[in-house]
Amino acid sequence: MPGKILCVAEKPSISKAVAGHLSGGEYQTQNTRSTYIKNYCFSFNFGGSWGNCDVVMTAVIGHLTQAHFDEEYEKSWNFPPPQSLFAAPVRVNVVKDKEDISSNIQAQARNARALFIWTDCDREGEHIGSEVRTEALKTNPNLDIKRARFSNIERAHVIHAAKNPIDLDDRQVNAVAARIELDLRIGYVFTRWLTTSLRPLGGPLAIADDGKGRVISYGSCQFPTLGFVVDRYFRVKNFVPEPFWGIKITHRRDGIDVMFNWKRHHLFDRAVVIILFERCLSAKIAQVTKVQEKPTSKWKPLPLTTVELQKMASRFLRMNSQQAMSVAETLYNKGFISYPRTETDRFDKGMNLGALVDKQTQDNRWGAFAQNLVNGGFHQPREGRHDDKAHPPIHPVAYCAPTALNAEEGRVYEFITRRFLACCSEDAKGHATDVEIEYGDEHFGAHGVVVLERNYLDVYPYENWKNSVTLPKFTVGERFEPTEAMVTEGATTAPGYLTEPDLIALMDANGIGTDATMAEHIDKIQKRKYVFTRPKGASGNAPAPGRGGRGGGRGGRGGAAAGEGAGGTGVQEFIPSTLGVALVTGFDGMGFDTSLSKPFLRKEMELRMKDICEGRTTRAEMVRQNITQYKQVFNQSSERLDVLKSRMSENSPLSVFLPATDFNDRQPMVASDARHVDVPSCGITRTAQIASRVKVVEATTCLLIHLDGDGDECDDEWRSKKPKPIEGDKEITWEMKAASMVTRKAWDTTTLLEMGPQILEASPAIPTSMLDPVLWAK
Amino acid sequence: MAQPTPRPTPTASSAAIQQLTTSLVQSGLPTPHPSFLQPILSSISSTSQRTPPLSSLHATARLRLLASDLTGPNILSPTTPYFPPNTSNVQIPSQTLSTDIPVQVLDIEDLGKSKWEQIEALESERKGETTKGREVIRVIPDSSDNASSLSTPATQTSAAANQASTTNIRSAGPFRLLLQDARGQKAWGFELKKVEKLGMPPYMAIGCKVVLKRGCKVARGMVLLEPATVVVLGGKIEALDKVWREGREGRLRDAVNTGTGDSG
C-alpha cells in the first residue's frame, strides 16, 4: 500500500543529507514558512511492507517545546515564594519562534501514511522525536510512527536505517522529560532564592554590569562542576611542600652509566635515608638478584569516545571541549565523521572497518599507513568496557581532503582519523630488561627498553615511546662495587589548578552531565563568572631551571606533558572567582550531609534517568524522589543562609567577580635553599673513607625523576604507590601527585660521620617532644 | 590497673605462679612480675571452687599484659631486659642487641607518604568522602565508630554505600616507630623490611607490644625492624591509643607548619 511518508530530522543539515542519499540526489525543494526549514520531496522504496513511497523530508531545530510555569509565577521572584515552584504545575508548550516549524509538521502529517523520525539517536534525540510525534498526531491521529536508527550519515548506513525502522523508545523520552521538569523546578527555586537572598548584600551582588539586577544562578550540574574547581583551588592554595630524600646508584659498565633506582623511591625522613645510605656504603658490594628480559608493548589507544575527544582536544588541538564539540558536530553534519556524542569505546564486530580504512588511502599524510593496513596490516581494535548501545566510537566515515575544511575542522578531522587508524593498527613492540640489585639492606632496579616496532605510533603523533638506555649484561648472583652512590633530595610540589581535561574526567567519573552536556556546564560556570581560565603554566617545559627559581617544581609537570609528544599547549586551567569560592564554602559550611557543591545529588539524578531507560523506575517516581531530596536541601539551606551570607561578606563586594587568586601568584614550590643540608665546600671531590668509589657531585645539579612518560611497565612500581592512573591520561594523575624535582646531593662518608648526630637531631621528622634529652645527649 | 596490695589475703601458691609464668614465657611473652599474676590467680580461685584450667588463666594473663603499660610498677619481672645504654647513640654506626627486649609502641609515622598527603586523607575521611580513582564517593558513617559526630544522613546514594570499605586502605609504609622498654627508655625503630603486623592505627594500636629479638640490628641509634628479629605480640594501651588517634591530624599539621621553617 503506497502513500506519503513524512520524515523529520533533528536539524536541517541532516534532513538535506538524508534526502540526498535516499533520493539519489533527485529531490524537489519546497520552502516553508520558516526561513531555515525546507521540505525535500522525492520517492524511495523502503522495501518490505512499505514499498515505494512518496517522501517529504523535513526537519526541526532541536527541541520544539519548552517547560514553564504559569504566568502567576513569573511576575515576582519573591512571591509566590521560590519553594512553591517545587509543586507548581509545569506546562509544556511549543516555543513561540518554533510555531512555524510545528505547523509545517502538522500540515505535512495530515495526508501522510506514516511518520519516520530521524532525530539523533540519543536520549535528547528520542525526546525531540516525541515532540515531533505529538505535533504530527494533532492533525493525523492514525499515523504510523517509526524511527530510523542511525549513527552517521554515510550513504549505505542511511539507506539501511531507512529500510529498517524501529519504534520510538518511550522510556528514554520519559527520562528526558523527568530531567527537564527537575531542572526547571530546581533551577528556578534555587536561582530565585539565591538571587533574592544575596542581592541585599549590595554592590555587584545587587546590580550586574549591564545595570540590570544581578542573577546568581544555580544549576544541578553547574554547582558540582564549580565544586570541583574550588576543591582543587584549595588543594593548591593550602599545599605545603615537604622535603624527601632518596638513594641513587650508578654503575658504569661497558661505557654505559646504568642508573639504579631505589625500590623505596623516596622517604620523608632524612635521618632514616642517611642511615640506610650509610649501610649501603658499608656493604661495599652489591649483588644482582634478578635479571629479566621480556618483550613489552605500548598499547594502541582505545576507540574514541566524546569525553576522550574533548580531553585530547584541550591537550593537543588548541581548543576547549566546547569548541571541539561544535567542530565535531560540523564534521558530522557534513558527513565526514560518525555521530560525535558517544560513550562507546568498542567497535561492533559486524562493522566493516577495513572499508573505512580503505577510504583514507588517498591522503598524502596517512594514506601510506592506511594502505599498509589494507594490505594486511589491519588488526581489530581493542575493546573498551563502555557501550551506550546507540552509537559506535567516533570514526571517519568518508574521506575529506584538507582543502575542504577550515583549520579547526582540519585538526579535529586529522585527530579522529589518526586515532581510528591507530586503533586499526598494532601495539608498539619493544624489548624490556630489568636488573635488580641488593646493596646493603636496600634494593635497587634498573630498567631498559628498546623499541623494536613503532606500529601505531607512526600514525599517532599524540603519543610517543622512546628507547631508554640499553642495559649492559648483568648476571644473577654476580657481585660488583657500584661506581657511584648518592643521596638525592627533593620536595613535593603542589598539584596544578584544575585543567579542562581533568575537569571533564572528574565530571565523567562522578556522573555530572553527559558527554553531550559537560562542555556546556563548563561554559556556563565561566559565563556566570564563577570561574576564570588562563593558559596553563607557561613556565618551563625544560627540566632545567630547578631550585632557587620560583616555580621550578612546576617545570617538572610541564616536562611530563611535553614528553607525551606534539605540543601540549593550549590547555586551560580553572581558577574560581571569589564568588565561586564563597558559594561553595558557603554551602559546604552549612554542615549538612549533601552540600549542593558535591556531586552526589546530581549523580543520583543521572542514575535514576538510566533506571527509567532500563525500565526500573518511572518518570513520576523519579520526579517525586528527587524533589523530596532537593526540598530537604532547600529547607536546610534556608535555615543556614547566614553561613552563606557571611562567606559573601568576608570579601569586598568589588572583588566578588574577580579571580580568587592573583593570576601571577605562583606557589613557591621549594621553600628555598635553606632546606639544603650544608655540605662544607661542596663541589670539591673528596676521597671517601668507607667506600672509596663514592663520588661527590656538585650540589646543585638537577635532574628529573619519575617523568619518563613512556607508558611501559617500568612505571608500574611507581604507579603502584600512587593512585591508579586512568587509561590514556597518565600524566594527569602524575601531575596531581608530587612529581619530583630532585637535587643531587653529595655525601661522602666523612661528611656523613661528621654530621651524623647533627643530621639526626636536626631531622624535622622527629618531634622534639618525643625526644628524651638524656637519650640523645651524646 | 589497680596496684596489688603487698599482702593479698588468699595468696596464690608460688608453684601456681611459676606454672603460669612458664606457660606465658613459652608462648613468647615477656616474664611478668609475680604480683601481676597474683590477682589473676586469686580472683579466679576465690570466685569458683575449682582451679580453672591453665589455658584460661593463660589467656586472661596474656590479655591483661598486652593491655598494660609495660613501664608500670609490678607489670614485668624486675629482671626484664631493657635497652643497653648505647642503643640510642648516633655515633655507633652498627650494633646488635644481645638479648630479647620487650617494648611497646608509643608513636608511629608513615615515611612513605608526605604528611600533607596523610592530612588530606584524614580530612576527606572526616568529611565522609573518599575517592576511587577520580570518583568522589560518599562514605556512610559506621554505625559504631563516628556516627555521633555526624548529623542524620539526609539522602544517601546507594552507590556510595557499598564503597565504604575503601576508606582504610592500608598504607604500605615503611614506618618509623617510637619504642619504649620496661624502664621507660625510648628509641626509634625503622621498618627495614616489611613487618606484617605493624601499621597505622587502627590496623595496629598504640601500646602494641613487640619483642626485639637477640641479634636485632641498631644503626646510629635507630632500631632496624625486620621479621627475623621482631615478634609483634599485639595489644594496646587504650588511653594512649585514643589520645594518639584524636591528635594525629593536629600533630601532622603542626609538623608540616613548623617543618617548613626548619633549616636542615
Image (cartoon, coloured by chain):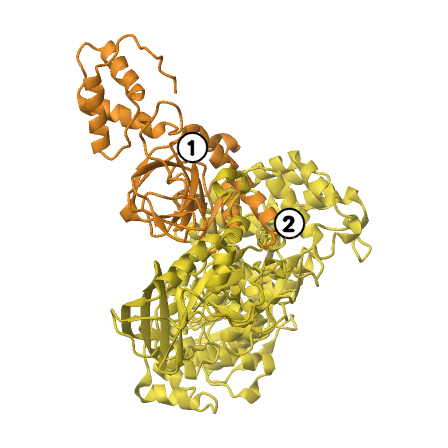
The CA span between labels 2 and 1 is 60 Å
**Would you call the spot at circle 2 few (<14 residues within 10 Å), some (14-19), or many (20 or more)?**
many
Q: Is residue B178 above or below residue A361?
A: above
Mark nearer the viewer, 2 or 1: 1
Residue at coordinates 22% horizontally, 17% vertically from top-left? B14
Give the side of residue A31 with respect to residue B182, left or right.
right
Toward which corner of the image does residue A391 lie, by quadrant? Answer: bottom left
Mark seen at residue B184: 1
Toward which corner of the image does residue B22 lie, by quadrant? Answer: top left
Q: Which chain is orange?
A: B
Please tell me whether mark 1 sits on a helix, a strand or a loop.
loop
> Can residue B196 be seen in this snapshot?
yes
Residue A733 picture location, percent across and down: 48, 62
Q: Residue under label 2, please give it.
A: A218
Residue A778 picture location, percent across and down: 49, 45
Find out whether the residues at labels 2 and 1 contact each other: C-beta distance under 8 Å. Answer: no
Please tell me whether mark 2 sits on a helix, a strand or a loop.
loop
Observer-nearest residue: A756 or B124?
Answer: A756
